[in-house]
Amino acid sequence: MDIYMYLKKDHQKVTTLFNEIENSDSISNKESLFSQLKEELLLHAESEHATFYKALKSYPETKDIVQHADKEHAEVKASLDKISSCPSNDEEWLVLLDELKDSVEHHIKEEEGEMFNKARSLLDEKTEKKLVDDIEELKKKLKTHKA
């Protein structure tokens, strides 16, 4: 598996969690699913930044795209904090969650489009595969550190 397939799997996991939250009738289930979503998004953003984005920052062709993506990651983190501080039975919680979903979907579209296309022209196959090992190793460290 290369880094693109790996990141697409992460993106799909997050999309599934958003859908499960939307389709849940139970507030406690929504809270539990949101907790999982938050963990996945934070883990994804941090590990992606430290591996995939780091590899792309050294190329002039992708430097601006990476800076833009990092800015979007910061916005997602801010949205997660805002949602976390809002009571889940409040109507505002669902509004904020919907805004977060729109932001994440926008980010995924840009990343899987322009960024992946440019990265494919810059990174060799060996690097694309090594980045998967790097990101998985970092995620394990981050999960262990959290526990």
Image (cartoon, rainbow, N blue to C red):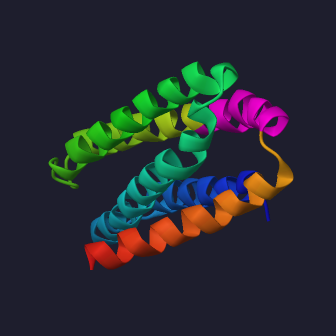
- Asked if residue 110 is among those painted magenta in the image, a careful observer would answer yes
Q: Nearer the viewer, residue 144 or 16?
A: 144
Q: Main secondary structure of the magenta part?
A: helix
Instruction: Please name whichever residue, 17 or 42, is drawn nearer the observer in this view of the structure.
Output: 42
Q: How many marks?
A: 0
Front in this rendered view, residue 97 or 105: 105
Residue 142 lies left or right of residue 60; in this view the side is left
Query: Is residue 137 positioned above or below 116 on the image?
Result: below
- The residue most toward the front is 58
**Residue placed at 24% from the left, 39% from the top?**
92
Relative height, residue 67 to residue 100 (above, below): above
Residue 104's place in the image compared with 45, above or below, is above
Q: Could you tell me residue 132's position as x and y percent? A: 66, 63
- Give me the residue at 65% from left, 25% from top: 62
The answer to if 10 sits in the magenta stretch is no
Q: Is residue 49 left or right of residue 110?
A: left
Which span of residues is magenta-colored? 108-122
Q: Quadrant of residue 113?
A: top right
Q: Is residue 55 above or below residue 66?
A: below
The quadrant of the picture occupied by the C terminus is bottom left
- What residue sits 73% from the left and 27% below the top? 114
116 left or right, relative to 38: right
**Could you say where residue 124 lies in the image, as x and y percent from the top left?**
83, 47
Residue 42: percent from the left, percent from the top?
38, 54
| Quadrant location of the N terminus in the rendered image | bottom right
* Frontmost residue, 35 versus 43: 43
Residue 128 locus on image (x, y percent): 75, 53
Residue depicted at 66% across the width and 57% down the height: 131
